[in-house]
């Protein structure tokens, strides 16, 4: 079993929908949690960076961390076609990042 | 630009050849990481430098993989005697250095072994 599990999708939603992306993990030592967005043939771009349990909001994006359940989420409000990409969750205790498989999202106009 | 720069963007090599991939981190970033991303998968850790010191190379898949960062800035990932399973995107990331700092990625080198 992988340390970080993420449903690869694909996930297809209409423009304007609320999108929910999730990851579960098994290592309770993880302290820092990130969401990256990756467009085709590009590197991962950092969207959200959180520490500990709770919520963090940045514009249309909200990240949630529930350390007791070992579960993290990313919500995208008012989704746009430009949000179509692969979303990677990542987490770490020390230096190296452990990534999920990535969820492919398509937002249809 | 101010981001992480990787070259070449694409590399095609025949099985058995040696290849070298370059990473130029964000100026002032102390920490540098290499990851390997297979098609349809998330990146997987290869190795980590703090300045010129290679502190973790636990992710390197075999002794054919070698990384260096001799002056604590530019890094090179070298793969000797390439094999088809080495085909992947190789990503470089850098961060300011403390554990709390996020990692910023380059666009990667797409390596194809024929």
Image: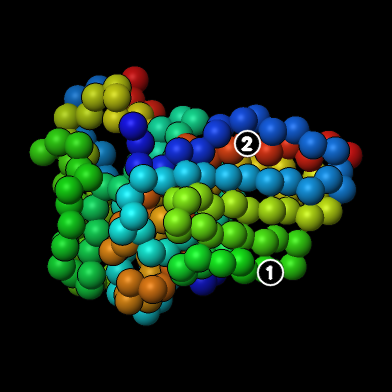
Q: Quadrant of the N terminus of chain B?
A: bottom right
Label 2 sits on a secondary structure element that is strand
- Judge depth for marks 2 and 1 and give the one in front: 1
**Position of residue B22 measured from the top left corner of the image (x, y, whole percent):** 33, 54
Residue B83 left/right relative to A33: left
Reading the chain from its start, which is encountered first: label 2 or label 1? 1
**Position of residue B73 measured from the top left corner of the image (x, y, whole percent):** 29, 70
Residue B103 left/right relative to A43: left
- Asked if B75 appears above or below A107 in the picture, the reply is below
Q: Residue at 45% x, 34% y: name it.
A: B41
Disc 2/disc 1 C-alpha distance (Å): 21 Å
- Location of residue A15 by image quarter: top right
Visual colour scheme: rainbow
Q: Please name whichever residue, A98 or B85, is drawn nearer the observer in this view of the structure.
A: A98
Q: Please name whichever residue, A61 or A52, is drawn nearer the observer in this view of the structure.
A: A52
Q: Is residue A91 visible?
A: yes
> Which residue carries the number 2 mark?
A104
On whether disc 2 and disc 1 are found on a single subunit, the reply is yes
> Which residue carries the number 1 mark?
A58
- Asked if A93 appears above or below A19 in the picture, the reply is below
- Location of residue A108 by image quarter: top right
Q: Residue at 36% x, 58% y: name it.
A: A30
């Amino acid at each position: 079993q992988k340390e970080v599990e993420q449903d690869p999708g694909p996930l297809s939603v209409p423009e304007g929908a609320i999108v929910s992306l999730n990851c579960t993990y098994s290592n309770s030592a993880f302290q820092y949690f990130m969401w990256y967005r990756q467009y085709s043939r590009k590197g991962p771009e950092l969207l959200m960076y959180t520490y500990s349990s709770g919520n963090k909001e940045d514009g249309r994006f909200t990240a949630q961390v529930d350390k007791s359940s070992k579960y993290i989420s990313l919500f995208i409000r008012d989704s746009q076609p430009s949000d179509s990409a692969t979303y990677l969750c990542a987490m770490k205790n020390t230096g190296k990042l452990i990534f999920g498989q990535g969820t492919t999202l398509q937002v249809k106009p | 630009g101010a981001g992480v720069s990787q070259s070449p963007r694409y590399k095609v090599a025949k099985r058995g050849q040696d290849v070298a991939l370059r990473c130029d981190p964000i100026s002032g970033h102390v920490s540098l990481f290499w990851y390997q991303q297979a098609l349809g998968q998330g990146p997987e850790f290869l190795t980590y430098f703090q300045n010129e010191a290679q502190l973790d190379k636990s992710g390197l898949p075999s002794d054919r993989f070698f990384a260096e960062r001799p002056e604590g800035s530019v890094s090179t990932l070298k793969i000797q005697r390439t094999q088809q399973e080495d085909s992947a995107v190789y990503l470089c990331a850098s961060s300011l250095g403390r554990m709390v700092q996020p990692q910023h990625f380059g666009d990667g080198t797409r390596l194809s072994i024929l």
